[in-house]
């Protein structure tokens, strides 16, 4: 330890070494982690020592390829199919993860459905409800299932993956924007409710970071967005994965209730 840099341990209140960014001994569930940003989060968490539960609902072949890739990189992980918007499946998923990798104490809520841009006249309530199911019902069900263990050990990390669209008020995207706003409010409320058990709840809100599902997006739209980014480059999945891993670590033990944009300065709070 460098002299003069002793500090209070985030849970005990005693002096100790600087808090670690390592996640050894923890089990992380990353929902929707077979590809894209979820895959990057899972890989980064695993690289920091966490055991990682990869989750998918559709696309078994792609999910298995991701699982094999992470295992080849030396990451302890397992693959779990499950619908995180279904109450019965959530309980079963958490039980299967605990049996394979140990009780979950790092929860990353990332799974998302398709996100078409439409004027409000072309939406119906069923689509609005699907957005709420993924971004409010899913974190609610997962958190409720995992809280008994987190409260018992007085430790837990919950990270919701939001979006810059809530701050930017993107038009023709009302269902997604509204659901992300609801998820933001839920994050803040849960952070206050669970703080007494040293359980932190935060949100990471990426901008447009091109991944597989963006491969057919119009180049003109991509060029227009990139031109607005103050850092003058595209974000990459690892930019999100690094922040998620930090929020799960002891170094972020005093940070809760926050919504952190990852968009090169597109929004300033």
Image (spheres, rainbow, N blue to C red):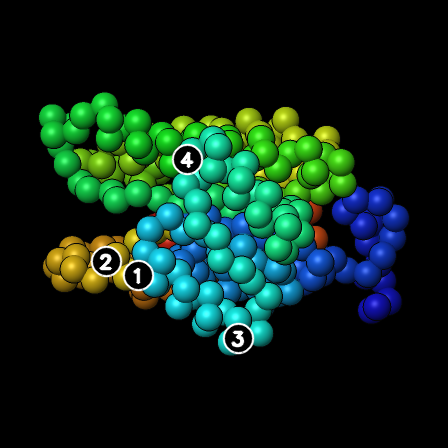
Mark 3 or mark 2: whose residue is earlier in sequence: 3
| Vertical order, 72 against 233 (above or below) | below
| Element marked by disc 3 | loop
| Vertical order, 153 against 186 (above or below) | below
**Which residue occupies 26% across, 44% down?**
114
Are the two marked residues, 1 and 2, in contact with CB atoms closer than 8 angstroms?
Answer: yes
Numbered tag placed on residue 214 in the rendering: 2
Report if residue 206 is visible in the image.
yes
| Element marked by disc 4 | loop
| Residue 141 image offset from top left, x and y in percent | 51, 32
Q: CA distance from mark 1 to mark 2?
A: 6 Å
Within 10 Å of disc 2 (Cα), the crowding (few <14, some 14-19, many 20+) is: few
**Which residue occupies 41% across, 35% down?**
85
| Vertical order, 71 against 106 (above or below) | below
Mark 1 or mark 4: whose residue is earlier in sequence: 4
Q: In this figure, which residue is indicated by the disc labeled 4?
A: 85
Mark 3 or mark 4: whose residue is earlier in sequence: 3
Where does the N terminus fall, quadrant-wise? bottom right
| Vertical order, 203 against 66 (above or below) | above
Q: In this figure, which residue is indicated by the disc labeled 3?
A: 73
Within 10 Å of disc 3 (Cα), the crowding (few <14, some 14-19, many 20+) is: few
Are the two marked residues, 1 and 3, in contact with CB atoms closer than 8 angstroms?
Answer: no
**Which residue occupies 48% across, 52% down?**
80
Q: In this figure, which residue is indicated by the disc labeled 1?
A: 211
| Residue 146 image offset from top left, x and y in percent | 62, 37
């Amino acid at each position: 330890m460098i002299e003069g840099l002793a500090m209070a341990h985030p849970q005990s209140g005693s002096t100790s070494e600087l808090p670690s960014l390592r996640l050894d001994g923890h089990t992380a569930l990353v929902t929707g982690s077979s590809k894209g940003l979820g895959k990057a989060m899972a890989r980064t968490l695993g690289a920091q020592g966490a055991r990682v539960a990869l989750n998918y609902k559709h696309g078994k072949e792609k999910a298995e390829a991701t699982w094999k890739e992470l295992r080849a990189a030396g990451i302890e992980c397992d693959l779990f199919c499950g619908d995180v918007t279904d109450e019965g499946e959530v309980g079963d998923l958490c039980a299967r993860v605990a049996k394979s990798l140990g009780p979950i104490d790092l929860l990353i809520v990332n799974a998302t459905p398709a996100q078409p841009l439409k004027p409000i006249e072309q939406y119906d309530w069923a689509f609005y409800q699907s957005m709420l199911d993924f971004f409010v019902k899913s974190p609610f069900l997962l958190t409720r299932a995992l809280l008994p263990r987190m409260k018992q050990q007085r430790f837990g990390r919950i990270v919701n993956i939001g979006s810059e669209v809530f701050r930017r008020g993107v038009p023709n995207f009302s269902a997604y924007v509204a659901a992300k706003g609801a998820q933001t409010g839920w994050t803040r409320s849960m952070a206050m409710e669970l703080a007494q058990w040293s359980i932190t709840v935060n949100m990471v809100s990426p901008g447009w970071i091109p991944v597989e599902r963006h491969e057919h997006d119009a180049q003109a739209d991509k060029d227009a967005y990139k031109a607005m980014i103050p850092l003058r480059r595209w974000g990459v999945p690892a930019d999100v994965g690094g922040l998620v891993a930090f929020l799960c670590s002891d170094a972020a033990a005093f940070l809760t209730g926050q919504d952190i944009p990852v968009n090169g300065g597109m929004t300033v709070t």
